[in-house]
Image (spheres, helix red, strand yellow):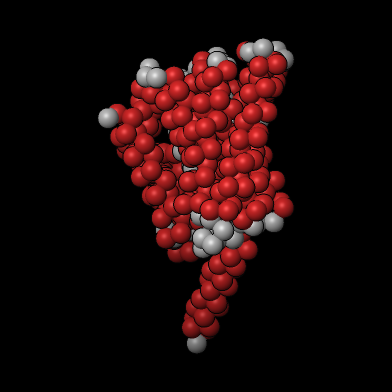
Amino acid sequence: MQIVLGVLMLAAVIAVMTLFTFKAPHGKKAVSALSGAACATFLPQAFLSYAIGGVFHVQFAQQIGDIMGNLGGLAAGTLVPLSFGISPVFSVLLGVSLLKVKLLPAFIAAYLVSFLIKWIEKKVTGGLDLIVVVLVGPMLVNAIAGLISPVVMMILHVIGSAITTAAVTSPLVMGAILGGIIPLVGMTPLSSMVLTSLIGLTGIPMAIGALCCTGNSFLNFTFFRKMKFGDNATTIAVTIEPLTQIDIIAANPIPIFGVNLVAGAVNGIIVTLFGLVINVTGMATPWAGLIVAFGFNDPMKVIMAVLLILVSSTIFGYLGALVFKNFPIHTVQELHADEAKDDAKKVADTQEGATDLAH
């Protein structure tokens, strides 16, 4: 029952984030900013701290990675206001105040407070806006983050408990469930790196999470190319790091999540059968996790497992494209066109307002 509850909670989070992306004011830009914050903090931590620092014992790189991995709140608190068009000074001011806040609460708080900061920029002039923002912004954004943090952590705990419960059941069931869930989390703002770090996943479950993320990158390379979600740059970007393409993923949840879920489950079983382990947490990322796997396992076993995962993922990529051949999709070009229309409308509204003031 706990496993079912965790999976349903994850599905609900994905649905909410999809609605937020397309229906909330500045939703697309805010989610892109969140994705950028995760890529700027957790991804360097995975590569520098664990892949280079842990496997090759480069302490300098490990120290830098650890520092960057703890700055998710600062990054989200800065990039989200910037996505609203708020001045860089005010954006950094909010971001610095969220230095010790986790990524997701910081994102939500910064998103809400950005509307107020935007209003202050328009209504308060003569240099007083800086003073008002200094007095109001940091305290308000931290108060909101403090209120919502327990709720965010509770959601992560429910999803994490489903994973740990699966780990003590049948190994193959565990492999299928973890292989299906963790790569999907990696394609949402929750971030698989954040989730696995939060629940302290290690051993076989961590290897499943890491190598299934690698497998899903193989899958998405084929699937995105065949479905033509975007150009070659889009396909390469989603292969390297899915979070960089979170807007197009959120625009096409049924085909992308559906195919990735099935392929991830099969790849999870493959990793389980090989008995691979990763004894550091937070490695649920496509390429850093793969590198770290060589540090904890027989290299030949890793190579054999990855080759099987590559074949499996490529097959599912072609099968998925065949199944969803006639399914209506949204492309990167459409999303950019919608953003251009929104920007043009804002410019027109601003010019109209200036004309009215002139009269």
Residue 335 located left or right of residue 178: right
- At a point 37% along the width and 32% down the height, the residue shown is 159
Q: Relative to 63, is 27 above or below?
A: below
Q: Position of residue 125 (x, y in %)?
A: 50, 62
The N terminus sits in image quarter: top left
Residue 182 located left or right of residue 229: left
- At a point 51% along the width and 17% down the height, the residue shown is 204
Residue 75, image quadrant:
top right
Q: Position of residue 69 (x, y in %)?
A: 57, 28
- At a point 57% along the width and 33% down the height, the residue shown is 213
Q: How many marks?
A: 0
Q: Position of residue 115 (x, y in %)?
A: 43, 56
Which is nearer the eye, 253 or 259? Answer: 259
Q: Is residue 173 visible?
A: yes
Q: Position of residue 95 (x, y in %)?
A: 52, 41
- At a point 55% along the width and 77% down the height, the residue shown is 348
Q: Is residue 182 visible?
A: no
Q: Relative to 300, is 156 above or below?
A: below
Q: Relative to 358, is 63 above or below?
A: above
Which residue is most to the bottom?
359
Q: Relative to 220, is 175 above or below?
A: above
Residue 240, image quadrant:
top right
